[in-house]
Image: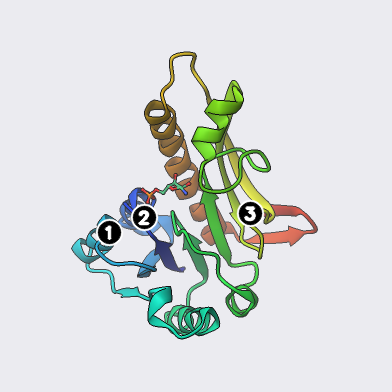
Amino acid sequence: ARLVVLISGSGSNLQALIDACADPAYGAEVVAVGADRDGIEGLNRAERAGIPTFVHKVRDFAARSDWDSAMTETVAGYEPDLVVSAGFLKLLGDGFLERFDGRYINTHNSLLPSFPGMRGPAAALEYGVKVTGATLFLCDAGVDTGQIIAQVAVPVLDDDSLETLTERIKVAERQQLVDTVGAMVRGGWRVEGRRVVVG
Ligand code: GRF
């Protein structure tokens, strides 16, 4: 299966996918990595792995819809079976969502629907929950509102700092991403209302 991965940052989730794809039994290949900014470690990771990259910055387009069209056309050109947003910090518009309907997934660092948005671990710490985690879901037009594919729970410890909690979540999140994408590409998935059934 062909994966296109979208990133905005360090790309540790991308790296986990690249590493998993090194095993032919995994059943997938990262065919391109796209970003909305340059100078990020995730792009270096892709280049080191010999994976083609592209960068479309919103500010280089006259209108957001033009950026959206460019993202849609560039990603479509790689003919992905699955588009994975892994720390990609932009919402894509209807054109993109329709083109990749049911095939565009995102990973978030909380147990949705709790703590959507940019501050997942911080919001969990501030609220005082004892369990948080990570969620893999199908993207829709909302912020972290799509149908849930997989979730993993992560304990919040009494002496956690933002850094220790964020890192504990990222470890579980990476494993979930690799395991679930693998299961999806090898066994397929289907959407039944709010439910996503893998395999
Ligand atoms: C992930 O924890 C994701 O949930 C959050 O940002 C992180 C991305 O990290 N939105 P990386 O770029 O994959 O290292």
Where residue 102 sits: x, y (%)? Answer: 64, 67
Q: Amino acid at mark 1?
A: Ile
On residue 14, the disc is 2
| Colour logic | rainbow
Judge the density around disc 2: few (<14), some (14-19), many (≥20) Cα neighbours within 10 Å: many
Q: Is label 2 or label 3 in front?
A: 2
Contact, CB < 8 Å: mark 2 with mark 1?
no
Callout 3 amino acid? Gly
Quarter of the image with the C terminus in it: bottom right
Rendered image quadrant of residue 123: top right
Mark 1 closeness class: few <14, some 14–19, many ≥20 residues within 10 Å: some
For residue 8, above or below residue 148: below
Which residue corresponds to the image point at 37% horizontal and 30% vertical from the top-left? 163
Rendered residue at 19%/62% (across/down)? 48
Occupied quadrant, residue 132:
top right
Circle 1 residue: 40
Q: Earlier in the sequence, mark 2 or mark 3?
A: 2
Secondary element at tag 2:
helix
Q: Mark 1 or mark 3, which is nearer the start of the sequence? A: 1
Disc 2 versus disc 1: distance between alpha carbons? 12 Å
Asked if ligand 1 lies within 8 A of label 2, the reply is: yes
Q: Which residue is mark 3?
A: 199
Question: Quick one: label 2 or label 1, which is nearer the N terminus?
Answer: 2
